[in-house]
Amino acid sequence: MGTILKKGRFFSVIAIALIILCWPIRADACVLMYSGGDMNDDGANMFMRTEEIGADDNKVYYISPAGNHVKGEKYRGCTDFTWTFTHDSYEYTARRDDNLSGICPDCGGTHKHTPYEEAGTNDHGVTVSATNSLNANAGIQKADPFTDEGIEESEMATVILSEAATAREGVELLTGIYDTVGAGYEGSGVMICDQKEQWYVENLSGHEYIAVLLPAGVTFMQFNVSVLGRIDLDDTEHVIASDHLFDVAKKAGTFVGDEKKNIIDYRASYNDYLMKVVNEDWSAEWREHVKKRLAASLKFLTESDEWTVDNVLKDNPYVMTNIDENGSITPLYNDLEMKDQMSLDKAMALFRVYPIGFEENVNTHLYRFYPDEEKTLGTVEWFAMDNCAYNVYVPSYPMLLTDTWKGYKVPLDVADITGKKPKKGDYYHNEEGYHIHPKGWDKSYIGTLSALTNLLTYGDLSKEEVSLAEYNLQSLQEDFVDRFDDLSKEIKDESSVKEREKIMTEADKEMAAQVHDLALALYRNFTYGEESDLIRHETHFPAIPVAIVIALLAAAGIIWRIRSSKK
């Protein structure tokens, strides 16, 4: 994702000036994975994404009620982009940056807006995840620059979830904005889905884009590098593209494809896919981070050590095409050969792998789409906040949620960072200094998870303590998997929509409270030595060689036969 301003810092006069001008000065990596139903163990189409900002940042999770925005309302977020709502907004689940105090941490504004409301599902079943940042090559940046009035990722979910009743409507809405006022600040990869269709949209310049309808037979990951290779634009049923893709690329001198056959290699023509462009947002250090994550994911999925930071960009097997070896149009595919089918457990495990799961994760959502289920049960979400490496995902049917747990909606001040070790209080220490947890952190879901995961990441804990935390978090995750199976049966047996909503909302709140309470208990145990009944202690049994087990069983059989013969 890209952010308007690095959060958790006091604003200088210069920074305030930059905010007023809406100049973004930082970008962060995010991770996106899609896996079609043919690649998954239960047949559901699935995608998963983590948003990343920083180890101390607060996000809030809530329900935006129907009519929160009214027809004719002119909305402005952190940038110069504005949107006039065409009807009263739909209800939807949402996460956003914390401006509950009245001051936006991103732009400093005090006007009513929802900064970086970047993921959610509305009551019509449309799901949006925005976005994974992308960077155009130098030629494209000059040929079709981003616009000051263009839509930025911070407003995409707000507009699409409020307005669109289907995924295709959402795609047409977003691409229509690109066609008119354009895109602001940077390129992006956006997921816009519903129960029946999952669309992926890549935009790398002010006005040019390609949107593709994802099939059930492909898996890809997007690590801030385009995943759209050779695309035949004649496949209008599955591809929506801007009108001047070829013209802009030719103007930039970067066009790769066959214009006569209406084919473009989008990645080669538009993306800085080898990451040659270095600037304040896309630094050399950040590029190495992206390559390490991509290599880690390929090693995990293929169970091969051939992938390194030296080959993952040029030879990325995630790149998709809709052209077969004979030059004919075919469903999107790539060269990724996974070792096994994707599953819920495997997807969660992938996002725990370092550096995919690391301290700058702030929230992660895993969506599964079941096309044959009734509408409100056709979308399932597993949601986590903070570092994916140490976490528990809470499951829900998002269209049945009417509220979220109170701990998701706690405003927090920015963390104070000092070079002097505090004499008391709760804090953690890394290369930036001592980060003092803000007042009320222990009442906040993400504040508590952040305190624990930063302690596990930076604290002076033993291997046994880290193992204990991992064991407890994983055990609770396993409980939730079982509980959601039971919960699904209970909901399906209930005919009343109101009762279904009540069951799901109460269960979601209860599970969120469980994660919070366990994280707080672990933190206090490691920091202050406090004992808690919430902490499970793993029981170890000594390993018994198989030969001994067989001998014992045989002996038991002999004894049984002797006793039987005496009767």
Image (spheres, grey):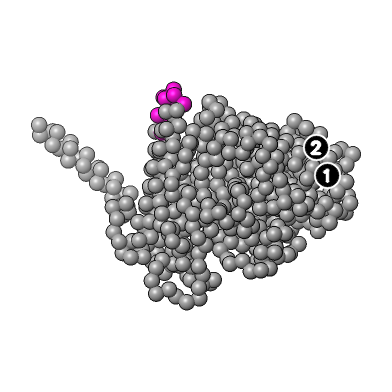
Q: Residue at x 43, y 58 (%)?
A: 441
Picture quadrant where residue 309 is located: bottom right
Residue 21, magenta (yes or no): no
Q: Is residue 421 above or below residue 326?
A: below
Q: Nearer the viewer, residue 269 or 510?
A: 510
Label whose residue precedes the other's in the sequence (1 or 2): 2
Give the residue at the far bottom of this rendering.
Answer: 420
Q: Which amino acid, mark 2?
A: Leu
Q: From the image, which quarter does the C terminus lie in? A: top left
Check contact, mark 1 vs mark 2: CB within 8 A: yes
Q: Residue furthest top?
A: 495
Residue at the (63%, 69%) spot, across then down = 12
Q: Which residue is mark 1?
A: 245
Pinpoint residue 128: horizontal percent, then vertical percent.
Answer: 62, 41
Q: Secondary structure at mark 2?
A: loop
Q: Quadrant of residue 560?
A: top left
Residue at x 10% of width, y 34% of height: 566
Range shown magenta? 487-497
Q: Which residue is mark 2?
A: 233
Q: Nearer the viewer, mark 1 or mark 2?
A: 1
